Image: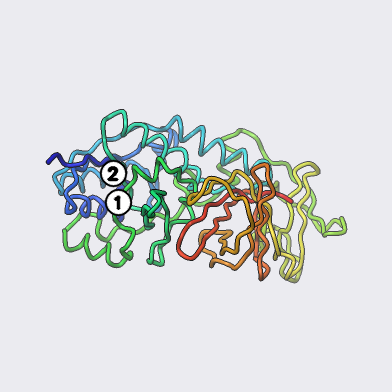
Amino acid sequence: MTKKKVMLGMSGGVDSSVAALLLLKAGYDVTGVTMRLRPDKYMSESQAGGCCSLDDIDDARRVAYKLGIDHLVLNFTDVFEKDVIDYFAAQYAAGLTPNPCIACNRHVKFDAMLRRAKELDFDYIATGHYAIIEQNQNGRWLLKKAPSSKDQSYVLYSFTQEQLSRTLMPLGKYTKPQARKMAEEAELPVAHKPDSQEICFVENNDYASFIENYTGKTSPTGNFIDKDGNILGRHLGITHYTIGQRKGLGVSFGKPMYVTKIDTVHNEITLGEEGSQYSNSLIASDLNFIPFDTLDKEMQITAKVRYQSQPANAKLIPLGNDKVRVEFEQPQRAVTPGQAVVFYDGDIVIGGGTIRIE
């Protein structure tokens, strides 16, 4: 019987390396692929703590050699620059706070990589994400939370049925400590490599400097105002700020103040006192649903407005025209336009969308 061929995205980290190990044990014919994502001008500046650097490519190659599998480097710099970096810079310039990891998953890892895998006659693609893919009795593919505290379903809500049917996530039912233990037992050279933390193309998490250098445009200074329009001070440019931000405002007020609104038309940032950073509802668009194609009635759900936030009880209300309203039982902190809101029914990912300015 011919083994099924799997193209595994290998970042050079522990998770994708252990995914290779598990796929081999499950009897798949595995080829490791490291995606070259960052344009040359950013690759040369690669630092520890990011991902997709030249060191990461070498680490992936060493793991592949250790496991006896083929390793390829595929160049996706064009799609990454257009759909991730350009998007990131444009969203910040518009006063929004994007999630580039979600954009990368949507456009690169599970679109461009899957198309390349099909061209090369692979049966599946695979990644080291912590999430579970299952098929229900009606043949519909579902995405579920991983039991691990490292559950990554939040950044995967944009999956299509076609993508789910061709994707394997062998780490879904494991925890990170279990993955590290497997890496140690297999003597993989990355067993103790730290997790990547930062956005891979932004050095030192300095978004504003990156955007300024990338676009060649300086975000102009403007006024901090309160909800009544009174001027409170001067801001450094809107790309320096995000909704809910308290630290690094550049002005001392003698009490905690939070960014509650970013107005790109008038170049003003509204600040509010403690409590003003909470919202009872939000509007989302650019929707994707997984267990069904469209939402045609209200649902009781839990929703996450940030990767690290806890799911909150809410009502999901269809508004038509690719929009929904999410009404929370308890106010949520820093509901941020540009970020994702992801909907759950228990462990099942219902879908998600992009938070919009109301």
Measured Cα–Cα span from mark 1 to mark 2: 8 Å
Which residue lies at the image location 68% right of the left edge and 56% below the top edge? 282
Q: Amino acid at mark 2?
A: Leu
Q: Which residue is disc 1 drawn over?
A: 16
Q: Is residue 23 visible?
A: yes
Specify few, some or many for label 1: CA neighbours under 10 Å numbering under 14, 14-19, or 20 or more. many
Secondary element under disc 1, as helix, strand or loop, is: helix
Secondary element under disc 2, as helix, strand or loop, is: strand
Which residue lies at the image location 51% right of the left edge and 45% below the top edge? 100
Residue 101 on image: x %, y %: 48, 47
Residue 288 on image: x %, y %: 54, 46
Q: Nearer the viewer, mark 1 or mark 2?
A: 2
Apparent side of residue 213 relative to residue 27 in the rendered image (left or right):
right
Specify few, some or many for label 2: CA neighbours under 10 Å numbering under 14, 14-19, or 20 or more. many
Residue nearest the viewer, comparing 40 with 133: 133
Quadrant of image for the N terminus: top left
Q: Which residue is disc 2 drawn over?
A: 8
Q: Are marks 1 and 2 in contact (CB under 8 Å)?
A: yes
Residue 40 on image: x %, y %: 41, 32
Q: Amino acid at mark 1?
A: Ser
Residue 52 on image: x %, y %: 37, 43
Furthest-front residue in this view? 138
Classify 256 as above or below 250.
Answer: below
Which residue lies at the image location 46% right of the left edge and 50% below the top edge? 156
